[in-house]
């Protein structure tokens, strides 16, 4: 059975690992219902959210909490996850900052499908709200779809475009998939979430084992993989923390209950650098909103739409309407020389044979000397390589082996967060189990080092009146620990106005 998603290994809080299998589910919904007959003790874990909202909410948080409908559950596994989150308050701010552009649109889908509001926070567990997130198992996007499951849910994946990273498309697919899973498990949302993580088959087999032993069939009683046993409590934990933020001394960032981004129909293929210019946005920010596009332009066969901040959407539409069709893309005329083929020509112009074939309406890869071809080019120039090769370079910076000496109080989760890897990987590299007790002084092999700052740029920040490390960390999207590390001789008890701080901020390459 294919799970909806797979382990994301580079989050600040490492989410749990998924099965690597990409085999699409072979059971129809009817056959799955058939296989679940006899499980009379399975009862729905939630009620359907209300059909209509009361008076308009001012913030996304108010709307989100109104749509909550999972039951209040007291369980040590939830308490453990709450404690882990609360040990990292800077992370709770980071994920809110990342979620800000997307939460309204996610809630629109959640409400339209009458799903529990808590599911809007599933990307916290899946990807830490990183739109470019990609796991070692090749799951991708906010919702961490595996390739096979993504295709099953209608998400196109080709050389030009990956629907798993398309904010709108993946959100629609994920909420539909969750809806389908919930029907399979007769309305039990905890089993639904377990199946999203581990696959329908895994959950059904666990239920069958318990049934044979006359054991309870609820989520908490099933013999599920350890990753799945952590996955559901982690979502319930983050949902509880946010809805009781004051009690937990957690700050909720103000996020208005209105769309931050708009989908604009562009009609046909368009150079992304040109689109960013027309939207009056840095290309990096534009790509961050449109991570589904894998090349320097939108896909020839669509989708022919881009996401633009609402404030710039109307201006973008007006500018696009005045743009001549011939200027949507840059082209180079190439006369084929003896011995050349499409692959060689594509390599020369940093494009693909399929792109050239599509642009010239060639029925096959066969070409002849003397023939002229139109080659689609990137207006990004050499910046194109840095922008779209960022993932590969970012991965290479992490492939280092380091030895970590365990300190008092360390857990697998803490060490995994420190090195941006997964706790189960640490256990596997050291032939341990994630439940193994770590002892101070114990040495662990970490095969992926801390995030490299090769793709970052140094800046100097002058401390202003009222500044604090917390405010500065939020302003630049870095951790307080990093601020201290970068300025070891400047961190007294208090910051002083006029003080100069050294800060490394992310470069143009998108985070993975």
Image: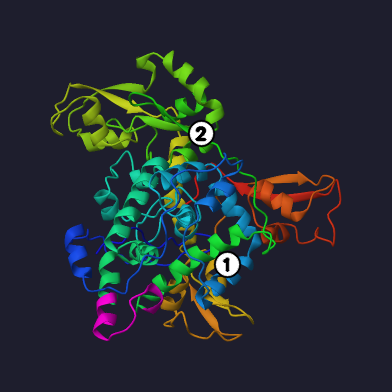
Q: Secondary structure at mark 1?
A: helix
Q: Nearer the viewer, residue 378 or 115?
A: 115
User: Which quarter of the figure has residue 483?
Assistant: bottom right
Span of residues in magenta:
207-221
- Identified at 43% across, 30% down, the residue is 272
Residue contact between numbered discs 2 and 1, judged by CB atoms under 8 Å: no
Residue 114 horizontal/vertical position (percent) = 40, 49
Q: Residue at x 57, y 71 (%)?
A: 414
Q: Main secondary structure of the magenta part?
A: helix
Q: Nearer the viewer, residue 277 or 127?
A: 127
- Is any part of residue 14 visible from this angle? no
Q: Is residue 33 at least partly visible in the picture?
A: yes
Q: Which residue is mark 1?
A: 418
Q: Earlier in the sequence, mark 2 or mark 1?
A: 2
> Is the residue marked by circle 2 packed among few (<14), some (14-19), or many (20+) residues within 10 Å?
some
400 and 33: which one is in front? 33
Q: Is residue 215 above or below residue 118?
A: below
Side (left or right) of 300 relative to 283: left
| Residue identified by numbered label 2 | 283
Closer to us: 403 or 176? 176
Does dot 2 land on a helix, a strand or a loop? helix
């Amino acid at each position: 059975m294919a799970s909806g998603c797979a382990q994301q290994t580079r989050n600040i809080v490492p989410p749990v690992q998924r099965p690597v299998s990409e085999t699409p589910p072979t059971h129809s919904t009817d056959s799955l219902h058939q296989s679940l007959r006899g499980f009379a003790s399975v009862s729905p874990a939630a009620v359907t959210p209300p059909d209509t909202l009361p008076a308009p909410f001012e913030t996304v948080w108010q709307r989100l909490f109104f749509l909550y409908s999972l039951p209040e559950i007291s369980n040590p596994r939830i308490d453990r996850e709450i404690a882990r989150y609360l040990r990292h308050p800077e992370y709770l701010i980071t994920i809110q900052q990342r979620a800000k552009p997307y939460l309204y649109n996610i809630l629109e889908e959640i409400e339209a499908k009458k799903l529990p509001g808590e599911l809007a926070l599933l990307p916290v567990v899946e990807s830490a709200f990183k739109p470019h997130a990609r796991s070692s198992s090749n799951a991708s996007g906010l919702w961490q779809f595996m390739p096979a499951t993504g295709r099953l849910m209608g998400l196109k994946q080709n050389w030009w475009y990956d629907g798993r990273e398309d904010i709108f498309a993946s959100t629609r697919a994920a909420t539909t998939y969750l809806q389908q899973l919930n029907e399979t498990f007769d309305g039990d949302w905890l089993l639904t979430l377990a199946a999203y993580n581990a696959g329908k088959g895994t959950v059904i087999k666990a239920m069958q084992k318990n049934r044979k032993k006359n054991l309870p069939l609820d989520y908490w009683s099933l013999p599920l993989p350890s990753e799945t046993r952590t996955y559901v409590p982690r979502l319930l934990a983050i949902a509880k923390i946010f809805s009781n933020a004051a009690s937990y001394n957690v700050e909720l960032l103000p996020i208005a209950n209105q769309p931050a981004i708009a989908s604009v129909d562009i009609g046909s293929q368009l150079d992304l650098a040109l689109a960013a210019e027309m939207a009056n946005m840095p290309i990096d920010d534009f790509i961050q909103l449109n991570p589904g596009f894998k090349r320097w332009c939108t896909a020839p066969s669509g989708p022919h739409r881009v996401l633009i901040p609402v404030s710039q959407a109307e201006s973008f539409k007006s500018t696009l309407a005045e743009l001549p069709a011939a200027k949507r893309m840059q082209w180079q005329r190439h006369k084929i020389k003896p011995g050349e083929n499409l692959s060689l020509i594509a390599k020369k112009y940093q494009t693909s044979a399929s792109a050239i074939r599509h642009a010239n309406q060639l029925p096959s890869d066969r070409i002849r000397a003397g023939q002229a071809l139109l080659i689609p080019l990137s207006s990004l120039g050499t910046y194109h390589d840095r922008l779209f090769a960022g993932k590969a370079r970012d991965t290479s910076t992490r492939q280092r082996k380091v030895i970590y000496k365990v300190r008092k109080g360390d857990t697998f989760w803490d060490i995994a967060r420190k090195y941006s890897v997964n706790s189960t990987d640490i256990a596997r590299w050291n032939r341990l189990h994630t439940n193994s007790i770590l002892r101070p002084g114990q040495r662990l092999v970490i095969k992926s080092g801390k995030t490299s700052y090769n793709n970052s740029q140094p800046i100097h920040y002058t401390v202003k009146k009222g500044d604090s490390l917390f405010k500065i960390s939020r302003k630049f999207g870095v951790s307080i620990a990093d601020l201290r590390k970068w300025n070891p001789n400047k961190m007294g008890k208090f910051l002083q106005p006029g003080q100069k701080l050294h800060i490394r901020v992310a470069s143009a390459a998108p985070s993975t």
